[in-house]
Structures are given as structure tokens and as C-alpha cells.
Amino acid sequence: MENHRIFKMAFSGVYPHYINKAERKGKTKEEVDTIICWLTGYTQKQLQDQIDKKVDFETFFEKAPQLNTNVSKITGLICGYRVEEIENPLMQKIRYMDKLIDELAKGKKMEKILRS
């Protein structure tokens, strides 16, 4: 597996940027947490534990209870790449999260973001 720099970055270091991006567009931390928990299967407490432990992205996704079964419905461009075509499994999971937060910031309805 390729070893991208982001894999070893602390999730807790990027998490505030997700919140800031959402809040700049009138969205909330709770909505960001809902999206992350939906994607990873973490409960709110488990998510907070991962943030408090300052785990890197690799560990964050390794420890995730279960990736949502609807992730295959997440499609489109993020950072110039089609998220559904990213070959590295860990990078794809990170980009799924980026894509969902981006959709929230762009005002997409939560039901659509959560692919329900």
C-alpha cells in the first residue's frame, strides 16, 4: 500500500477543519459528527475517544466499527479525483469523508448526504 502523508496525520488535527468548513456555511458540529458516525459506524462517544487519543487516519479507519454499507453510493469528484475510482482503500475512505463534508458545506440535505 502506498504510504501517503495523510495516513499518519492525526484525525484530531483535521477534524476542526471539517467543523470550520461546515460552520462557515451555516452547518453545525453535530451535523459533521452525524456524517462521520454514519460513515464509520462510531458512536458519538467512540468518535470523541478517537479524537482524544489523537489517532492517525490509518488507525481511525482501522478501528472504525464498520464502514457504512451505502458507501458505494458516494460518487463524484473530490480533490480532482473520482472518489469511486480511488484504488487505495484507505485513501478512498478518507476521500469519502471529505466528499460528505463537502456536500454538507454546499448545502445538500442530510438525507441525500447519508444516502437514505
Image (cartoon, helix red, strand yellow):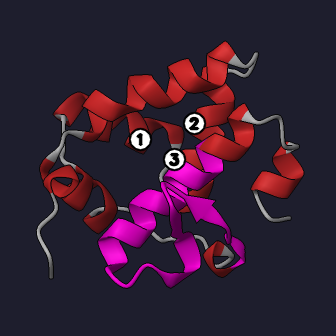
Asked whether, in this view, residue 27 is left or right of residue 50, the answer is right
Q: Quadrant of residue 32?
A: top right
Q: Could you tell me how far apart the alpha carbons at marks 2 and 3 are, in whole angstroms?
A: 9 Å
Residue interval drawn in magenta: 73-101
Asked if residue 40 shows in the view, the reply is: no
Q: Which mark is residue 47?
A: 1
Q: Quadrant of the N terminus?
A: bottom left
Residue 7 versus residue 84 in the image, above or below: above
Q: Amino acid at mark 2?
A: Asp
Q: Which mark is residue 43?
A: 3
SS category of the residue bearing label 2: helix
Asked if residue 113 shows in the view, the reply is: yes
Dot 1, crowdedness within 10 Å: few (<14), some or many (≥20)?
some
Task: State yes or no: discs 1 and 2 in contact (Cβ < 8 Å).
Answer: yes
User: Outermost residue toward the front?
Assistant: 80
Task: State yes or no: discs 1 and 3 in contact (Cβ < 8 Å).
Answer: yes
SS category of the residue bearing label 3: loop
Dot 3, crowdedness within 10 Å: few (<14), some or many (≥20)?
some
Q: Earlier in the sequence, mark 2 or mark 3?
A: 2
- Residue pointed to by mark 2: 33
Asked whether, in this view, residue 97 is left or right of residue 47, the answer is right
Nearer to the camera, 80 or 116: 80
Q: Amino acid at mark 3?
A: Thr
